[in-house]
Image (cartoon, rainbow, N blue to C red):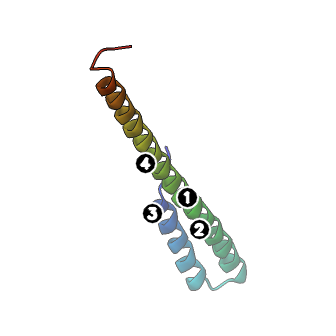
């Protein structure tokens, strides 16, 4: 199951709150490391989401260009297949 930016960001916020509330230095440090890891995962998820959306837009543009080219070819040949 792929996780979303929102999921990872929520975990990072929880870790940040845990670090702030920690009384022991080792607990605070562990929570801060956890927060850093979650934030890295969140940014990676955001990039994946962005790249997927970009790829889908490019595929849609390519399909539309191919459709237009086919329509022009059919129109130029009088609608007869080659």
Q: Which of the image's four quarters has the C terminus? A: top left
Neighbor class of circle 3 (other Cα within 10 Å; few <14, some 14-19, many 20+) is few
Q: Is there a contact, CB below 8 Å, between mark 3 and mark 4?
A: no
C-alpha distance separating marks 4 and 2? 27 Å
Residue matched to label 4: 57
Counting other residues with Cα less than 10 Å from the Cα at mark 1, is it few (<14), some (14-19), or many (20 or more)?
A: few
Q: Which mark is residue 47?
A: 1
Q: Which residue is mark 3?
A: 6
**Image quadrant in which you'd find residue 26:** bottom right
Towards the viewer: 28 or 52: 52
Residue drawn at point x = 64 percent, y = 68 percent: 34
| Sequence-first disc among 4 and 1 | 1
Q: Are marks 4 and 1 in contact (CB under 8 Å)?
A: no
Q: Spatial distance from mark 3 to mark 1, Cα to Cα? A: 13 Å
Q: Say left or right for 25 vs 10.
A: right
Q: CA distance from mark 4 to mark 1?
A: 15 Å
- Rounded to the nearest angstrom, the CA distance separating label 3 from label 2 is 10 Å
């Amino acid at each position: 199951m792929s996780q979303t930016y929102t999921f990872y960001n929520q975990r990072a916020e929880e870790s940040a709150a845990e670090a702030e509330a920690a009384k022991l230095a080792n607990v605070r440090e562990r929570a801060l490391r956890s927060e850093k890891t979650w934030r890295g995962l969140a940014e990676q998820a955001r990039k994946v989401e962005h790249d997927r959306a970009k790829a889908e837009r490019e595929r849609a543009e390519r399909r539309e260009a191919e459709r237009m080219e086919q329509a022009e070819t059919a129109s130029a040949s009088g609608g007869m297949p080659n």
